[in-house]
Each structure stands twice: as C-alpha cells, then as structure tokens.
Amino acid sequence: MSTFTKQYEEIKHIANRIFDNPELGYKEHKTHQTVLDFLLEVNPELTYEVFCGTGIKTTLGAGKSLNLGFIAELDAVYAPSHFHADQETGAAHNCGHYTQVAIALALYKHYFTTKAYESLDFALTFIFVPAEEYLDLPYRDGLKAKGEITYYGGKPEAMKRGIFDDIDLGVCVHAMGGEYPKRTIEINCDLAGFLYKKYTFKGRASHAGFDPSSGTNAYSMSTLFNVALGMQRQHFKDAEKVRMNPIVMQSDMSTNVIPNQITVGTDLRTQSVEYMKEVAKQMDQAAKGSAIAMGGEVEASTQMGYLPFVQDRYLSEFALAAYKENEAIEDILENNAISAAGDIGDLSFMMPCIQIGYSGFTGTIHGDDFKDIDPEFIYEIFPRYLTEVFNKMNGQLDKSRIYRRTFAEYEALLTSITE
C-alpha cells in the first residue's frame, strides 16, 4: 500500500476543513494555522518561515544545487452566492485552492515520512502563498497605504520579500473546472495577463431640461468610448484572446442634470505583454477621441494586474513523460491558451514554471456550484503522479535551460507597461 493510500483519509479531512473555512487573500489565518499544525504534526522539528502574515515556506533537502519550489495558494474567492460560502465574509473555495493545499501537504508527508526527498538531486521547498486571487481590493489598498504590502498578488509580494530568491524553478497545480469523462490532467495551458484601466470623462453640468445646451455630457463621452471599443474588437488578433469588460464605476448622474463626470473602468487581458501595451494605447486613444468629439476631457490611469503565463515547455516534458507511464490517469490536454490569469505569470518571468491541471470537479470555476467529486483522484492518484514527475526530473534537469531574472528587471517591466 502506497503512502498516499495510507494517508488519503487524513488528507481529504484536511481539504474539507479548508473548504469549510474559506478566507480571502492576506486574511487566511485559519488556513495558515491548519497548514502549520499539520506540518508540525508530521515533523515536530519543522524549520519554516512565515511571510506576508499567512504564507509559509519550508524545505526538505536544503543545500542541494537546485531548489524546486512546489507552490500552493491559500486563498478563496469572493463568491457570496456559492452554496458553501462563508456567510459573513462571502468567501468561497470555488477555485479549488483548498485542494492545492491538501495536495502539497500530501506530498510533504510522503517525502518526509519515507525520506524519499533524500534521493532527489534537488531540494523540495513547499511554499504556501496568500492572495492569488486579484480581489478585495479596498482591503489591499488599506494594507498598501499602511506599508504592509506593495503588491496585491501574493506571489509578487513574496518575490519582493525574497521568498523565491533561493528557488530555481516553480511547479504549481490547479483545479480544472467542469466534469471530464476520464481522469484528466493538463499541461502547457498558457494564461493571459491583465491590467486595469480607469477613464474619468469630464464635461460641464447644466439643467437637463431648462438649459441642456450649456452642458457637456460626460456620460455621452463614455458611451461613445464603449462604442469605439466595440468597433476595435474586430481588429484584435485572435491568438491574443483579448478581453475587456468596461463598466461605469463612478458617476454624478441625475436625470435632471447633464452629467459632468463619469469614471469607466475595465480590465484588459492579452496573451503577451507587447500586445497588452499595444491595445492599452488603442484604448487610451479611443477614450481621448471620444472626449474630444463631445467637447470634454478625459483622465486615464493604469493599474497592473498580473503578467501573462507561458508555461515552460522544457519542464513540461517531464510531466508528459510521467503521464505516459502512469496507468491511473486516463487523458491529458495540451497546449491550450485561456483568458484566465494568475500571479504564476509574474513568477514565471523570474524563473521557469509549470502549472499542471487536474480534473475531479463539477461546476464552473468561480461559479456557485463548484466542488470536488473525485477526491480519490485529487488526493491520492494525482499527488502520486507528481512524485513520478519529480523522479523524471531527478538527475536530468539541464541547468543551462533554467533561466533567472532579477526582481529589478521585473519591476522595470511593470513600469514599462503602466507608464
């Protein structure tokens, strides 16, 4: 009987506990304690580092020439309509992060109790990161104002604090939404990057009935802007999977007053940084032209989200090789690109990273009905497969194909986008 079979019930129990106690980013205190209690029970002499308040980092086999970071995300999504949402906070685990954490704990217990990490030529560092979901922004604005964080995303914040300074490559896993007829994994699924744009259109107020001719309608500017974006969509490159979602965020509208100020906000998602810059410039031009056409003005601002994630094809070769020898996993998906995003994109700028998807769920990711339905696959079969991936890497990683960029280079890239 494998160690994963022996510990299956325990790991499933931990996963259910985290599922029952969802917490938003930088607030994952109960989840932090659940993870730490488990690690200390497995290894009473655990050496670990706490970062960003709730993050945890611990290493098996420290001192080896390579260090592989296995990354799990602690936070939930704000989804108050989910069937198992926290009634006070609206948090719900409908992105599957609770299973990531359980898988990481299953791996840690396996490697520690069997001492199998000793035979690997690389160290295994387990990093439990907060705040992957880009939400609850007013709270994070407050943390930023107090100097407690610089970045809204947990991985960029951890990068800034040096948590990844000794890591050479990153491996993440992620739930796959929807039901699959077979037990399935996914490799080389690239993610979009995104940023936020805000446009404040300014006009001149006047009485809408008595003296509309004296006014300059800011709402009309924003309407023209929306039309311009709609016209632009035809010309975007299909491969970039551009997504925009403009909404009115602030206004001073009244039915009897010509509105003199409207703020429109939208995200912008693309598959590459260069195209993100290009489309953002087009959006700025559309906003400026719409304001000028109606006799008004517009102010624009940009807030960076996450960088695009292009999975490292070299590292994925090991995941594919392990799949081909695994009889329990029946199907594999490869080389898709989607418009969802994650801060793994930011980490992948610094070092090679992969994110392996796994089935075993029903419902829509971030939807009201998302939950796991195949815990045996998620907590027993899939983590055992991950050890097979690591075994394929053992003694075979080509250091010349493992790149490294500095945090200064990362900051310079973000600046080049937002300015």
Image (cartoon, rainbow, N blue to C red):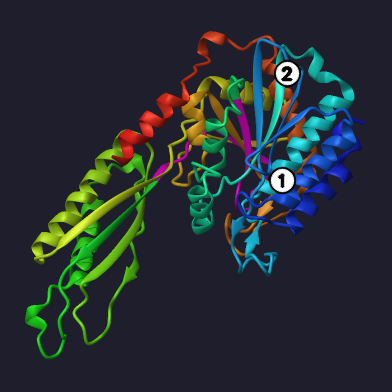
Q: Residue 365, located in which quarter of the rendered image?
A: bottom right
Q: Nearer the viewer, residue 158 or 38?
A: 158
Q: Is residue 242 left or right of residue 351?
A: left
Q: Secondary structure at mark 1?
A: helix
| 349 up-or-down from 262: above or below | above
Q: Is residue 216 left or right of residue 186?
A: left
Q: From the image, tell me which residue sits under label 1.
A: 99
Expressed as whole percent of the image width and height from the top left, the position of residue 87 reads: 68, 69
| 417 up-or-down from 196: above or below | above
Q: From the image, tell me which residue sits under label 2.
A: 391
The boundaries of the magenta stretch are 170-194
Q: Residue 266, located in which quarter of the rendered image?
A: bottom left
Answer yes or no: is residue 194 visible.
Answer: yes
Kind of residue sitting beneath label 2: Asn
Expressed as whole percent of the image width and height from the top left, the position of residue 317 reads: 58, 21
Asked if residue 41 lies in the magenta stretch, the reply is no
Residue at 16% from the left image edge and 55% from the top image edge: 288
